[in-house]
Amino acid sequence: MPQFCFYSKNNPAQEPVGVLRAATREEAIKFFSLSKQLSLNDFLTIFEVKEYAYGTQEGIAESAKQLLKG
């Protein structure tokens, strides 16, 4: 299953805010938008989602999990 990340469209470095494994990009978008409590349209206005190609980088993935646990 591929990994996806999301990042702010205003961030030229495209630093991931969160990372997860999902079957499709659309599934990842739904999960990320729910985690930010935004509608799909609002989420996609602020953030971009792309396949995460930089390895697992467990530290980032763990940070994302902690953010979602609240």
Image (cartoon, grey):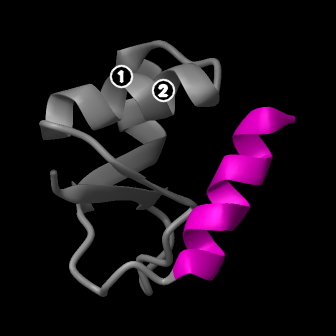
Q: Position of residue 12 (x, y in %)?
A: 42, 82
Q: At label 2, which amino acid type do we have?
A: Ser
Q: Nearer the viewer, residue 1 or 38?
A: 1
Residue occupying the far top of the picture: 39
Give the extent of the magenta segment.
Answer: 58-70
Give the class, few, some or many, for how many residues have Cα within 10 Å of label 2's Cα (few <14, many ≥20): some
20 left or right of 58 in image: left
Q: Nearer the viewer, residue 57 or 11?
A: 57
The question of residue 69 being in magenta is answered with yes
Which element type, helix, strand or loop, lies under badge 1? helix
26 left or right of 45 in image: left
Residue that appears at 50% across and 78% down:
15
Residue that appears at 27% across and 59% down:
3
Tag 2–tag 1 contact (CB < 8 Å): yes
- Which quadrant would residue 37 be assigned to in this image? top right
Q: Which residue corresponds to mark 2?
A: 33
Look at the picture and state if 1 lies above or below 12: above
Residue 30 badge: 1
Q: Position of residue 39 (x, y in %)?
A: 47, 13
Q: Position of residue 25 (x, y in %)?
A: 17, 40
Instruction: State how far apart marks 2 and 1 are (Cα).
Output: 5 Å
